[in-house]
Image (cartoon, coloured by chain):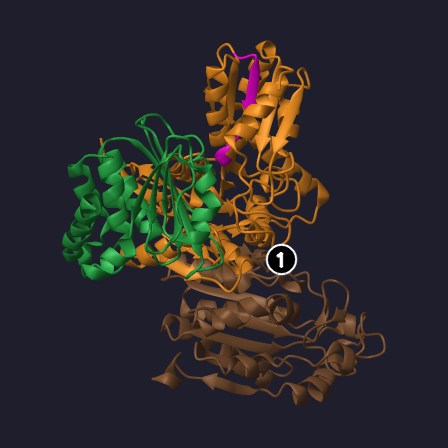
Amino acid sequence: MSDNYNMLLAGFGGQGILFAGKVIAYGGLMEGKEISWLPSYGPEMRGGTANCSICVSDTPIGSPLVLSPNVFIAMNLPSFDKFIDSVEAGGTVIVDSFLINKKVERTDVKTFYVPATQLAEEKGLKGLANIILIGKLFKETGFCSWASLEKAIAKCVPPRKQHLCASNIQAIKLGMEY
Amino acid sequence: MAERFLMKGNEALAEAAIQAGCKHFFGYPITPQTELAAYMSKRLPKIGGTYLQAESELAAANMVLGATSAGVRAMTSSSSPGISLKTEAISYMAGSDVPALIINVQRGGPGLGGIQPSQSDYWQATKAPGHGDLHILVFAPATVQEMVNLVGKAFDLGDKYRMPAMILADGMLGQMMEPVELPDTMEQQLPEKPWATCGHKNARKHNVINSLYLTPQALEELVVERFKRYEVIKENEQMWQEYRTEDADYVVVAFGASSRVAMSAVDTAREQGIRVGLLRPITLFPFPTKPLKKLAETAQKFLCVEMNMGQMVDDVRLAIECKRPVEFFGRTGGIIPTPAEVLNEIKKLGGTK
Amino acid sequence: MAVVFEKPKALTDVPFHYCPGCTHGIIHRLVAEVIDELGIEGNTVGVSPVGCAVMNYDYFGCDMVEAPHGRAPAVATGLKRAIPENIVFTYQGDGDLAAIGTAETVHSATRGENITVIFVNNTIYGMTGGQMAPTSLPGQITQTTPYGRDVNSAGYPVRVCEMLSTLDGVALAQRVAVDNVKNVMAAKKAIKKGFQNQIDKKGFSIIEVLSTCPTNWGLDPISSLDWLRDNMMPYYPLGVYKDEEKGARIK
């Protein structure tokens, strides 16, 4: 895969889709890359579908709206169904297989199934399924260095909640090891 | 180099305004500019400023009229339907020769329209931002960093020419995060405003901020004087970016969000051997006629790409005096055109599909 | 020779344009006298309305801003928030304050905006030639209620002081008149209190002054004052509707 990533993260509101996107964006930023992060926004504040486009590139980013992702992380079935065919051939697909009981029929993409929501529950990392999936993404693509990823976590976790950094790192490792 | 960090466009606009010395913000909630007001409500009370959520956009814009009359830097922000309500105060401010910053994070229209990104307020911003003979300065950033840079510029030029300035952004730029560097937070020396109604301290004649002139001759004289100022602005303040235009047979013209899409399409077209470039207006008033005139000498065709039904395209035709064909491609209603769509239109310019 | 009467310093030399018998002139004078007595002209900024008093930016000697129709309290809010040490007042008619600017009036009042509002109520749109105002009385004949104000279609008049007196941000809501010497003196006292409240940071003060419009009422000046007493005062009783520091009721 080239060093330019056009990522799409999609799921329900409340799953931390936008936060996960921010972690990725900061990971890229720490590498000195060009970054864009574009959320979907709509009238539904909770529970509706949420998705987020992230571009990580060596050159200035044109359209920040990712229509043909080369990385797609799906955290619910409607998003999976909606976007799976738009993934670029050769792209990477990461599926929360606990929430999405469906296999990718395409054979021209690299697919990884991680029951992230279940893992998070089991390991006492409730709410960090999104970060577990980033761990998997990191392992499979190396979109940034480990040091950058650590810094990204520290940047994204609010200052008064820095104690949560450790559990986020734990979630990353869980995803990497799965 | 200052540290780069990620910021949403809306928040970057707010912080840049604070850095530019603006401590008075009057707003009213509307999607998709909400983060801007929220940011101000958090920051301004901490630095001795005013964040005020008004009862309406009408009131908010008129509070800006009051605050700027007192001589401070003041601003308001909204999105399309709210801007329509602010046009009242914008016209009065233009007619009273006072500066102000108005931010429009555009969404689809007309009416309540939608909440997704749009550029369909181009005409409103550049042709009729209020009733009467008037112009305001209009800036169209295309990146979050440029949003930061143009806010300071808008305040400076607004003060210099004593007129309102608008940042014409859109929902995409407002909502997206990109890396930004903020300007140094040096204590700025803001210009003197001897016209301000800040209390005469029994030391001068009273100042009056007013747009009423019941004698037609007096009003005409004033408007004509103002239009002379607009001519100076047209001569001196045009801003634009040219991208791969040096040898271009075709020139895409696009501003703001759609210029980013167009840039992606231009790159792909170049890879395919099509000699195409991009002219991106940064100021919409004054419209960058200078580079367009020049490009019309060498380019064969122009393509205007907008997120509306074709508004800026008229200004492109006027700028090049219809010397070359100007095609148009647009999506509207909140739809962002895709690079593939624009590429297809570029290909059509050369007669290929 | 001893000077026994002179123009207040806070008025300029520009002659008023008001119709004969109109009481705007008296009210202007009272505002100017109060500004003189409090010694605040140098740090006072006035906001002119749209309506008959639109050109009073030429009459008051302090700094002045001419606001869009109805928006004077919003403009005043901006002026006051920008420089809180300054004294800011608006001068508005009934159409400006109680129709097109109702939202600005109510919300600047409920915010407890520390400004002084001079509200001149003459139950008619004077500047545009005598149309129905929000305060026109039931049955009152105007250009746009030629058969008299029919409350079934045009609704009822707005009692501004009564309405605003329910708001916690209001420090003073008082209705006065300038139809005789005694009332003029009382009106001046009320206006002075409105400005003093602002100096003391007590909150929003509104002084409603019942006024005449001989031209559009079709009456001579003296009969106009009679009409005011006979028709307006019963509907709009003079008096103090609220007089306490803002927020006093919820402390």
- Residue named by callout 1: C55
Q: Residue at x 58, y 12 (%)?
A: B299
**Image x and y of residue B145, in percent:** 36, 35
The quarter in which the C terminus of chain B is drawn is: top right
Q: Quadrant of residue B149?
A: top left
Magenta region: B248-257
Q: Is residue B52 left or right of residue B229?
A: left
Q: Colour of chain B?
A: orange
In depth, the one of A159 and C181 nearer the eye is A159
**Image x and y of residue C156, in percent:** 70, 81
Disc 1 secondary structure class: helix
The quarter in which the N terminus of chain B is drawn is: top left
Chain coloured brown: which letter? C
What amino acid is found at the position of numbered circle 1 in the picture? Met
Q: Is residue B251 magenta?
A: yes
Assess disc 1: are there few (<14), some (14-19) or many (≥20) residues with their C-alpha within 10 Å of its C-alpha.
some
Chain coloured green: which letter? A
Q: Quadrant of residue C181?
A: bottom right
